[in-house]
């Protein structure tokens, strides 16, 4: 017997870096981990306290498959508060992280053989989940020329039609954002061509000075799906809590699939998650964003010393994606050597881009200013040894 061919998705190169970083740490060596795509802080106090209360007295049985009604209502209100968009709680599906949301969205929206376009570089799980579900992934080459984001022109230029488009703004690994006009253009084009738009908004809230991101929630009536999560802005990665906003035609399908696949998302996380959407919850998240902003400022200030080229404009999220090919090393070797010789862990671009990724690395600055400063010092010193 053997595993199904659909399950042969590639492992992340960063897992090897992480294993090497952990081994170094276990051996007592100092390692600065800037490869993990997660906030160094955990959930806010208000969420933790609520979780403690729930553990002591709460009913933590199954919830509705689409999520506990108070959380669905709180998420719907979030759209009024942040974007001035009226969302019916009936369209909110609470999910097991945004990862669980993608699985349900893709299952509900796409048949086997459906062609789904997405940006390269991009978060690898989209294409791996789609491939495992039997969809055909159509990669759009999104380099500096399109600010690493897909455009309507690229969709128009495709030789065959697609059934779906996955976008992320701010994006991982580049941090670049799609402006409101460009989002409107993409959503309109998708609506007019029967293309399902799936918008990953997991890094909303983590933006630096530019205009507030526009949400695809404005385009639910054109068939768009919004996917979001408590993992990044609210720093709740391990709680496994996310959500989707669904167009009318997908509500019943997602409800039925969600019940069958997992019965419900984690109940403790759901009930405690309501507290993340309280004034204290937003305030704690915002304090984290201010810390990321300070780290980003430091990195941008020291870019000339780092000497990296083609640095993606880090409009949001907490990543710097940059070309290190001037070193003469491919990014996997560059990252492995940086870790072995300077004790700094970064992610090779090959995890996000199977074509040009060997030129790029991703640095996650969701850490403390001290760690980021020390990491830059070490990288600058190590790069001198390569010269
Ligand atoms: C762009 C993007 N989308 C989705 C996810 C999945 O996050 P989660 O399942 O924790 O919501 C990640 C995680 O790094 C991500 O970077």
Image: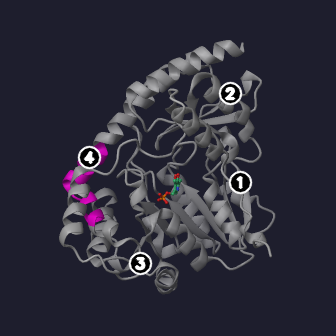
Whichever of callouts 2 and 1 sits on the residue coming sooner in the sequence is: 1
Q: Name the residue under label 1.
A: 140
Position of 233 relative to 313 (above/below): below
Residue 118 image-quadrant placement: bottom right
Q: Where is residue 279 in the image (x, y as percent from the top left)?
A: 20, 54
Q: In the image, what residue occupies the spot 75% across and 48% down?
A: 354
Q: Mark 4 points at which residue?
A: 284
Q: Mark 2 points at which residue?
A: 337
* Ligand 1 within 8 Å, label 3 CB: no
Q: Mark 3 points at which residue?
A: 264
Give the Cα separation between the discs numbered 4 and 1: 37 Å
User: For numbered disc 2, what is the local secondary structure?
Assistant: helix
Give the Cα separation between the discs numbered 4 and 2: 36 Å
Residue 302 located within the stretch drawn in magenta: no
Tag 1 and tag 3, C-beta contact below 8 Å? no
Tag 4 and tag 1, C-beta contact below 8 Å? no
Judge by depth and name the residue closer to the eye, 277 or 263: 263
Give the Cα separation between the discs numbered 2 and 3: 43 Å
Q: In the image, what residue occupies the spot 63% across and 71% down?
A: 195
Q: Position of residue 338 (x, y in %)?
A: 63, 26
User: For numbered disc 1, what is the local secondary structure?
Assistant: strand
For label 3, the crowd category at 10 Å Cα-Cα, with few meaning under 14, some 14 to 19 and many 20 or more, is many
């Amino acid at each position: 017997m053997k595993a199904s061919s659909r399950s042969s998705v590639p492992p992340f190169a960063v897992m090897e870096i992480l294993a090497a970083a952990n081994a170094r740490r276990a051996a007592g060596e100092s390692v600065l981990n800037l490869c993990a795509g997660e906030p160094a802080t955990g959930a806010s106090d208000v969420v933790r306290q609520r979780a403690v209360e729930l553990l002591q007295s709460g009913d933590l049985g199954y919830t509705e498959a689409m999520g506990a009604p108070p959380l669905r209502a709180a998420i719907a209100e979030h759209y009024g508060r942040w974007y001035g968009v009226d969302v019916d709680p009936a369209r909110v599906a609470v999910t097991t992280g945004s990862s669980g949301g993608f699985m349900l969205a893709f299952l509900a929206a796409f048949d086997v053989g459906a062609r789904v376009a997405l940006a390269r570089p991009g978060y690898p799980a989209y294409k791996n989940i789609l491939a495992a579900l039997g969809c055909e992934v159509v990669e759009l080459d999104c380099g500096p020329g399109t600010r690493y984001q897909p455009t309507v022109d690229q969709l128009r230029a495709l030789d065959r039609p697609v059934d779906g488009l996955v976008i992320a703004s701010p994006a991982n690994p580049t941090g670049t954002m799609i402006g409101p006009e460009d989002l409107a253009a993409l959503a309109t084009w998708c609506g007019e061509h029967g293309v399902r738009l799936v918008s990953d908004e997991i890094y909303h809230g983590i933006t630096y000075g530019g205009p507030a991101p526009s949400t695809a929630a404005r385009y639910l009536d054109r068939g768009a799906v919004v996917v979001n999560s408590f993992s990044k802005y609210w720093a709740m990665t391990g709680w496994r809590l996310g959500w989707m906003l669904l167009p009318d035609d997908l509500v019943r399908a997602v409800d039925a699939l969600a019940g069958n696949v997992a019965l419900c998302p984690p109940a403790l996380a759901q009930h405690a998650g309501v507290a993340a959407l309280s004034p204290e919850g937003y305030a704690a998240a915002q304090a984290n964003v201010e810390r990321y902003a300070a780290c980003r400022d430091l990195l941008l200030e020291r870019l000339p010393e780092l000497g990296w080229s083609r640095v993606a404009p880090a409009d949001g999220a907490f990543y710097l994606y940059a070309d290190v090919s001037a070193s003469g090393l491919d990014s996997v070797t560059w990252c492995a050597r940086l870790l072995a010789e300077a004790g700094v862990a970064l992610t090779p671009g090959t995890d996000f881009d199977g074509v040009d990724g060997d030129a790029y690395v991703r640095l996650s600055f969701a850490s403390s200013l001290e760690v980021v400063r020390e990491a830059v010092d070490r990288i600058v010193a190590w790069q001198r040894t390569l010269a």
